[in-house]
Image (cartoon, rainbow, N blue to C red):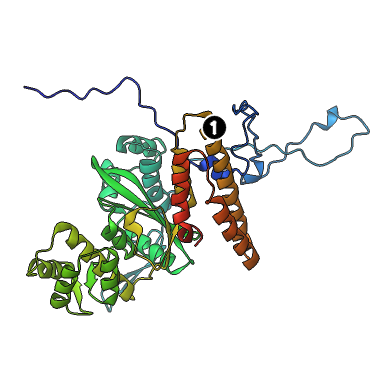
Amino acid sequence: EQGKPDIKANTKKKQGNHSSENERKNKNAGCDKDDNGNKDKKQKRKRQSKVSKIKVDRDEVCPIDKSILPADAVFKGYSDSIIQDIKIITDNVRYRREVYYSASSNKSYYGDLPTEVAGHGEYGVGIRSLLPLFKSECHLSEKSILSFFHNFGIIISPAYISNQWTKGYDFLHQEKSDIYQSGLKNGSYHQIDDTAARVKGKNHHTHIICNSSFSAFFTTARKDRLTVLDIFKNFSPREFVYNSTAINILKSFKLSRKMRKALDRTLKDKNKYDEASFEQILDAMPLKVGPNQRTRIKEACAIAAYWQQTDIPIIKRLICDDAPQFKQLTKYLGLCWIHDGRHYKKLTPIFKCHQQALDDFIKRYWDYYHQLLDYTKAPNPCQSIRLAKEFDDLFNTHTDYEQLNNRIAKTLAKREELLL
């Protein structure tokens, strides 16, 4: 007997839009309603001039036929019209390397190729950089990429194009690692988030870690605390240390006292273990370690090892959402206002008075957020005290809408992290 077929619906299920982008970017967001609470008609979009953003490659003067000019016509300069265009032409270079032969050493000596082509086969940097652009950004098939190059006179084989995705860009992994290491050293904070991804038909997670000077992307099968720690360590081998730091973290994880005493007897203080050895020790413990306990023990000892090592810069201030995998990893944890604001967009009041209460609070919420942004541009102690007091006033608001009150209380409980 065959199972029930999975028939897709004719229409997509409606999903609420919980994005806070409009409120985040526009100080006057939420003010587009009339006195009856209805949204005003869509305002005409203000188009910005793009001329100033266009790079001019050359100037070409368009002369006027002097015979059509009146006798008193005077030259007043130029009226500019910028026309954008693009050229796709070959840039095939024949490098003529000098060759000298020494009879005494029975050896030929050759002039060096430029560094941008030496050791990279028969194709220059332009072609090598276009290949990943066509594949990832333009979503072209390998056959379409091949046709493009052939149409413009580049003699290239299907095998070369195919090989780029398997071994052609291995050198970039080290470059990415160097950029990431440099990014970890710079900046007073780092921010992390993740989003869903598909790899070979399987669900994965793409992690974005960044600050004002860099952004790095990592795709992994999991997004638990150990995986996030792997990212912080640039995927160096996992290490585990059982010391006072690990013990304090285990207490915060509420690991039982009985299990902590068993660990005290089993693990040597300050010894460093690799993952295989650590797993063997946990397996051999007289007191059986359950799956959840094992995870917490590994997390605590891995965090302790991360804080102890000196090979990779340690992240001290992390800005993120309220997901559990980000907690306990850094000395300071700052929560993201954008993620917190989405919870208010998820509320679905039925009564008009509740809808109005929610709209009013959301407007106050984002007004306060923009005050925080202004403060970051010119921080001073007086403003800091004022904003802290205003936070308390805002998130001690009480309304007739109980679900909104509960949500406000949850934000108030995160005061320290939101005002970091």
Q: Is residue 353 left or right of residue 143?
A: right
Location of residue 3 by image quarter = top left
Location of residue 41 by image quarter = top right
Q: In the image, is residue 158 above or below residue 122?
A: above
Residue 418: percent from left, percent from top: 48, 57
Count of picture labels: 1
Q: In the image, is residue 298 above or below residue 142?
A: below
Q: Nearer the viewer, residue 90 or 137?
A: 137
Q: In the image, is residue 379 above or below residue 349?
A: below
Q: Nearer the viewer, residue 122 or 230?
A: 230
Residue 169 in sight from this viewpoint = yes
Q: Is residue 290 left or right of residue 400?
A: left
As helix, strand or loop, the secondary structure at mark 1 comes to: helix
Q: Nearer the viewer, residue 372 or 227?
A: 372
Circle 1 packing at 10 Å, graded few (<14), some (14-19), many (20+), is: few
Amino acid marked by disc 1: Cys
Residue 312: percent from left, percent from top: 35, 71
Residue at (23, 42) in percent of width and height: 200
Q: Is residue 181 left or right of residue 40?
A: left
Where does label 1 land, which residue?
A: 353
Q: Is residue 6 left or right of residue 417?
A: left
Residue 342 in sight from this viewpoint = no
Q: Residue furthest right?
A: 72
Q: In the image, is residue 330 above or below residue 149?
A: below
Residue 163: percent from left, percent from top: 26, 48
